[in-house]
Image: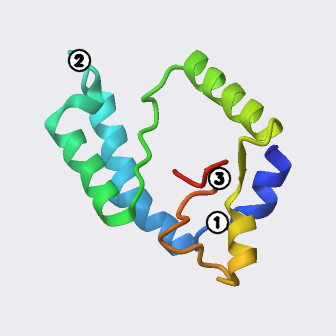
């Protein structure tokens, strides 16, 4: 699973990573570091950054949102779904459609469920 994922996912350019880091990840980390009264991602400042990332980038990284046991459980479910062929790499859709490096609006994720709905 991990090797297939690494083989099919293309990383963004270093400049793009730096932009995402400075625009979203660093400010979210700063909010997490100073917030202790409630879950940090529920603060207005964090919600504004997360919603902005979703609107502009079509994804958001909320590091520390889940505890390690929850992450492990989700990883196990994803791996089981992949083994049982309930998910397939989005790259399969890309190669069939001849889209090159762009997966298109109908297939923006790395993996799709069996029905193609994500």
Residue position marked by numbered label 1 in the rendering: 11
Residue closest to the eye, 100 or 92? 92
Q: Helix or strand or loop: what does disc 3 sit on? A: strand
Quadrant of the rendered image containing residue 91: bottom right
For the residues labelled 1 and 3, the Cα–Cα distance comes to 16 Å
Q: Helix or strand or loop: what does disc 2 sit on? A: loop
For the residues labelled 1 and 2, the Cα–Cα distance comes to 34 Å
- Looking at marks 3 and 2 on the same chain, the residue that comes earlier in the sequence is marked by 2
- Looking at marks 1 and 2 on the same chain, the residue that comes earlier in the sequence is marked by 1
- Looking at marks 1 and 3 on the same chain, the residue that comes earlier in the sequence is marked by 1
Q: Helix or strand or loop: what does disc 1 sit on? A: loop
| Residue beneath the point at 76% across and 53% down | 5
Residue position marked by numbered label 3 in the rendering: 111
Q: Point out which mark residue 41 bears.
A: none
Residue 7: x and y in percent read: 81, 61
Q: Which is in the foreground here, disc 1 or disc 3?
A: 3
> CB under 8 Å between callouts 1 and 3?
no
| Residue beneath the point at 61% across and 27% down | 74
Within 10 Å of disc 2 (Cα), the crowding (few <14, some 14-19, many 20+) is few
Residue pushed farthest front? 115
Residue position marked by numbered label 2 in the rendering: 38
Image-based side of 48 in relation to 80, left or right: left
Residue closest to the eye, 71 or 40? 71
Image-based side of 97 in relation to 43, left or right: right
Q: Quadrant of the N terminus?
A: top right
């Amino acid at each position: 699973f991990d090797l297939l994922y690494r083989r099919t996912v293309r990383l963004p350019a270093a400049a793009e990573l730096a932009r995402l880091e400075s625009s979203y990840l660093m400010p979210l980390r700063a909010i997490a570091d100073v917030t202790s009264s409630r879950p940090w991602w529920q603060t207005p400042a964090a919600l504004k950054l997360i919603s902005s990332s979703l609107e502009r980038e079509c994804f958001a990284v909320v590091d520390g949102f889940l505890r390690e046991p929850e992450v492990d459980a989700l990883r196990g479910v994803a791996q089981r779904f992949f083994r049982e062929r309930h998910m397939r790499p989005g790259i399969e859709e890309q190669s069939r459609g001849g889209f090159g490096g762009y997966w298109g609006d109908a297939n923006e994720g790395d993996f799709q469920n069996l029905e193609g709905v994500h």
